[in-house]
Amino acid sequence: MDRQLALEIARVTEAGALASASWIGRGDKHSADHAATSAIREMFDSVPIDGTVVIGEGEMDEAPMLYIGEKVGSRKGPEVDVAVDPLEGTEVVANGLNNGMSVIAIAEKGHFLHAPDMYMRKLAVGPSLAGHLSLDDPIELTLEKAARTLGKSVQDLTVMILQRERHSDLVQALRNNGVRIKLLDHGDVSGAIVSAIPECGVDLYVGSGGAPEGVLAAAALRCLGGELQGRLMVESEEQYARCLRMGIKDPDALLTMTDLVGTGDVIFAATGITNSDLLNGVRHLPGQRVETHSVIMRANTGTIRYLRCVHNMSVKLKYAAGMN
């Protein structure tokens, strides 16, 4: 994939963040999500790819835009898989909380897992722990291995986990081992990613969250040299059958990075809508100017770019009107 696609994809996430920012704190998650989705779908038309959505807003009968199987891009570039979450954290943005962002990842065609909309158990780590841990191990053994690999005591580990009732036993087990716990209210994708960013001070991310979000996080971790292991939490025969229909031969199998995002090049971009450990949120400045903060990553080069942009919205609107 051409390296210029990284900036093109960031322009798309910027559009989603700018559109949904108007709905921060207004208590209307549906309007916030629709604004981000509409803006991203429109901006995709200018991106030189022949893309197919494999992680999106749902199946065709569930979503009018960015549905699984939809073709996006100008159709004049490389064939790619597209994983997109126009608004990661709809309730977050609606309630003015942290960890809202717009996220897109692309990979060569056929590399992303077609993840069904269900829960997935996850273990995410950075480069220092990649290849050293197993999701199948008891949490006590995982902590012991992590501490030994990092050359620190178990009590000096910091573990991030979503604050959910379903995690109560796991949180208690972490407490019993004396680790530092960083509870995350929202933001499953960013929570997994920060385990691979040393400045965030998180050694590993555990617990369960959405399977589609697991693919997006794995795409970023592939660029960062980290690792995400997952296992689908199939809860019914219907869910099992759906996995088979989506091409997952063994829905109970441990999913590795190769299963989730393949082995080829990956481009990941995210733009903050509200503040998080990873990104600053959209900030309104005087004179109809708006500041965005994005991260752009590419697996083939391992380059991570942080992009801070100031958008003159009055000029943008005039330009858009002229284009129409």
Image: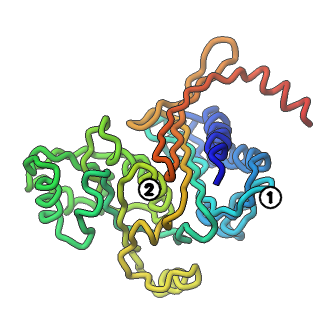
* Residue 30: percent from left, percent from top: 63, 49
Per the image, the residue denoted by label 1 is 75
From where the camera sits, is residue 172 visible?
no
For the residues labelled 1 and 2, the Cα–Cα distance comes to 26 Å
242, above or below 139, in the image = below
- Where's the C terminus, which quadrant? top right
* Residue 126: percent from left, percent from top: 31, 51
* Residue 183: percent from left, percent from top: 28, 46
* Residue 99: percent from left, percent from top: 44, 40
* Amino acid type, mark 1: Arg
Could you say whether the residue bearing mark 2 is in a helix, strand or loop?
helix
- Near mark 2 (Cα within 10 A), the count class, few <14, some 14-19 or many ≥20, is many
Could you say whether the residue bearing mark 1 is in a helix, strand or loop?
loop
Q: Residue at x 44, y 85 (%)?
A: 250
Q: Residue at x 58, y 51 (%)?
A: 104
Per the image, the residue denoted by label 2 is 222
Please report whichever mark, 1 or 2, sits nearer to the chain's N-terminal start.
1
**Relative to 322, 107 lies left or right:** left
* Amino acid type, mark 2: Arg
Q: Residue at x 30, y 63 (%)?
A: 166
